[in-house]
């Protein structure tokens, strides 16, 4: 959920986007797909505090607070950890790693 972009909209544009996001959130919740609220900031002035992102998702978008907190904390942390592993020179693809022998062979 790109909270920062929603905050910039007004009038019918905002209503249409909220409608679209609410439908997508409904699909995500039914399919048990994690929701990751983000400010989608392009600079430091566009950043939002995690509690603000959670508040927006719960009050405006109707996401329950537990789901929003999970998206901000655990799911985001897990994504970063997974992406850092992919930067390893041993990583080839999901589930495929280069294994080197310690014997020099």
Image: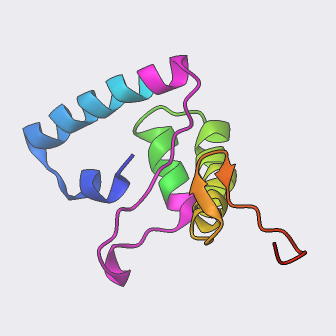
Question: What colour-coding does the image apply?
Answer: rainbow
Residue 63, image x, y percentages: 52, 34
- Work out whether residue 54 or residue 95 is closer to the camera in this orientation and state it: 95
> Residue 89: percent from the left, percent from the top?
61, 72
Main SS, magenta residues: loop
Give the quadrant of residue 82: bottom right
Residue located at (35% from left, 62% from top): 40
Task: Compare residues 71 and 22 and report the one nearer the observer.
Answer: 71
* 82 relative to 102, above or below: above
Is 32 one of the magenta-colored residues? yes
- Identify which residue is drawn at 57% across, 70% down: 87
Q: Where is residue 17 in the image (x, y as percent from the top left)?
A: 21, 37
Most distant residue in the bottom direction: 44
- Give me the residue at 66% from left, 62% from top: 81
Magenta range is 27-52
Q: Which residue is drawn at 49% across and 55% down?
A: 53
Horizontally, residue 39 falls left or right of residue 42, namely right
* Residue reaching furthest to the left: 12
Residue farthest toward the right in the current orientation of the protein? 103
Q: Where, quadrant-wise, is the C terminus in this rendering?
A: bottom right
Q: How many marks?
A: 0
């Amino acid at each position: 959920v790109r909270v920062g972009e929603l905050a910039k909209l007004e009038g019918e544009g905002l209503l249409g986007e909220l409608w679209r996001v609410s439908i997508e959130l409904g699909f995500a919740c039914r399919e048990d797909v994690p929701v990751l609220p983000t400010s989608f900031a392009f600079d430091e002035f566009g950043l939002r505090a995690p509690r603000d992102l959670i508040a927006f998702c719960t009050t405006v978008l109707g996401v329950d607070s537990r789901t929003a907190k999970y998206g901000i904390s655990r799911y985001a942390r897990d994504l970063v950890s997974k992406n850092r592993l992919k930067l390893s020179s041993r990583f080839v693809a999901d589930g495929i790693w280069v294994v080197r022998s310690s014997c020099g062979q």
